[in-house]
Each structure stands twice: as C-alpha cells, then as structure tokens.
Amino acid sequence: MTRAVTHLTLSHFRSHLRASVHVDARPVALFGPNGAGKTNLLEAISLLSPGRGLRRATAAELVRRPEQLGWRVGALIDLGAQKHEIDIRAEAGQPRSTRTDGKPAAQTELGRLVPMLWLVPSMDRLWLDGAEGRRRFLDRMTLSFFPDHARAALAYDKAMRDRNRLLKDQARDARWYDALEAQMAEAGARMIQNRQAALGRIAAAQEGAETAFPTSDLALHWPEEADPGDTEDALAAAMARSRAADLRAGRSLTGPHRADLHATFRAKGVEAAQCSTGEQKALLISLVLANARALRDRDGAAPVLLLDEIAAHLDETRRAALYDEICALGAQAWMTATDAHLFDALGPRGQHLAVSEDAGTSRVDPVQPQ
C-alpha cells in the first residue's frame, strides 16, 4: 500500500502567493537558497496532521504578508486503493477549519488518515534543551501509534489548568481537588501507558534492523524520582499526596506533564546529551526511521516523512545511507537542502524540485536530477 501527498495547493500561505505541486509516492527533494520557501512547503504539509504543525504556528502567523488575507492548504492523499481530499483554511482573523472529502472533520482524525513524522533544525538541540521539547517529540511519536493520545492530552491539560487555578487561589476544599484529580488521573494514565507502549514499539523496531544510524535505549524519566505510576489509582494517589507541595508552588508538580525522555547511545553507553553534534543528529534520525519502520510493519505503509535541512551534520556516506533507508521503507519523504548536489545520492529514485524566490513570491519548479 502507498501513502503519499500527491497534490499540494497553497494560496496566500507564508511566502507562497499560489503554488501547485504534483508528485508521486517517491521521495521529494526540495532545494534552493535560504528564505526561498522550502520549509514553508513542509509546514503546509505538516498541517495535514493533528496539532499546529512543525512550527507550532497560529492561524494568523501562517498568512502571507502584506496581503494578510485568508490562507488555504489543499492536498490529495493517495492511499493506493483510496484517495482523499483535505482542505485546511483560515479566513482573516478566524481559526482554521478542516474538511476531508468535502465534509467538516475533526483535526484529531487527520492522524488516522495520514500519519506523519518530521525532523526540523530546531530539534537538533533536543537532547540539550529542556524537557518540554523532548515530551513534545515523544508525544508526536506516541500519536503516530495511538491517535486517541491527543484526546487524552487535551483532557488532561484542561483539568490541570482548572486545578492550577485552585492552587494559585490557595483553595482548600478537598472535594474540588478530588474531582479534578480524578479527571487528570484517568487521562494521565492513558497518556503514560500510550507513551510507554510507543517506546516499546520503537525499541522493537530498532532491534535487528540493518541501519547505518546508531541505536538508542529510551526511557521515561521523572524528576526527583517522582514516578507517579502508570495506573489511574496510582496517579490519583500521587496527586493527592502532592497537594501541599503544589499549593506552595502554585502549580501541579506531579503527573505526565513532568515526564522526560532519556536516550542513551547504546554502542557507547553514553547519554545523548553527552554525544557529539553529529551523533545527536544521527540518533534523532535513527528514532524517526525506527518510528517509520514500526508504522510500516503495523499498517503495511510507511508514514509521510518531513525532513527539513536533513543533510546538515551528515557526511556524504550517511546522506547516501539515509536515502537508501528511506527508499527501502517505501516512504514518501519531503526533504529540503540548500544545494541540489546534497541529493546526488538519491538520484532518479526521487523527485527533485527547485524552490526559488521571484519578486517576493516563492515558486516551485521540477528539475531532472543530474
């Protein structure tokens, strides 16, 4: 089975006044100078999945300037025997809306239609920066396996915001806390269990895989050994025990929102944060490839991959190995680079598109690989 974005149309989106891109299920190599609009294309595709896309932008931030009209992203999704049209748009000053095959659709349902994974340059510091980015990375992986993870996270966050308001107001009525903690525990237990199951699937996908990229051991980590457990009852009890400390802090200190993702370079026994820049990049690529491998084995088709400036920190040998693995997966990968020659090893196995700027407007032109 194939899974690909075969037609992409943009209107007043970022630097693209209008764009229409027709491709097939092979990898797509986008090249051009900085600022030409390559990442904007990837961002548009990322909106076809749940969430706010690879830049986490609001609807207002996506509009092309100076016009500041509404914007639109349209796509045709090819699933082999089935094809689906997705239309995402936002009128000026309005939130975005989503339609699938002409009917209104919940954004969370997009994860079932077109699973998608991505790597962007800001993630190169994933192992060095704070835990929030690693949780987001983990939740994207988890969401690829369990689309209902988004609903659990939304329910948990809503109940936690209400609980945090009580804490900031120094409310003492235990009944209010009991009710909110019950909601947090139910949703939070699902989140923790989903995350653990996702890590198990990633680990299984790494075992025995022939890959040029390093294997990592992954684990959930809790600050100060404050592991709340992974059951609803254990999580509710942990939050009840934490109320006094939470009141002093004015916020919730226990729960899945405090989890961190730890990775260890298995061959060296070194934590990812202590690895070289190139090794950290290779570990990230390895995890995305393992995630894609697990989804392909489960679904019979690989997810769509978005790999922005993927050649950075990779030598020629590893670049060639990456393209080999993407082709072996049968994945449609949208990749960007500044220079066309960085895709030489991909050759005719992929589609090559030149992205350029013309009078303040981005344009996309197909080219034949050398």
Image (cartoon, grey):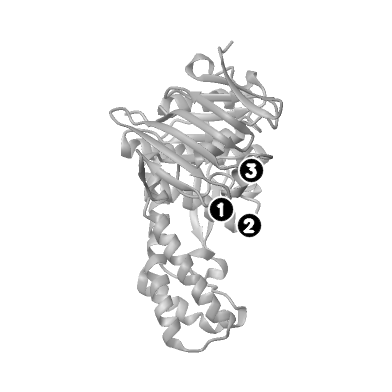
Q: Say which of 292 and 38 sits in front.
A: 38
The answer to whether 327 is drawn above or below residue 183 in the figure is above
Q: Position of residue 113 (x, y in %)?
A: 36, 40
- Mark toward the viewer: 3 or 1: 3
Q: Position of residue 159 (x, y in %)?
A: 45, 71
Task: Give the CA distance from mark 1 to mark 2.
Answer: 7 Å
Query: Label 3 amino acid?
Result: Gln
**Residue at mark 1:** 134
Q: Are marks 1 and 2 in contact (CB under 8 Å)?
A: yes
**Residue at mark 3:** 68
The answer to whether 197 is drawn above or below residue 83 in the figure is below
> Does any portion of residue 12 appear in the rendered image?
yes
Image side of residue 282 versus residue 74, left or right: right
Image side of residue 344 versus residue 201, left or right: right
Query: Label 1 amino acid?
Result: Arg
Q: Are marks 3 and 1 in contact (CB under 8 Å)?
A: no
Earlier residue among tags 3 and 1: 3
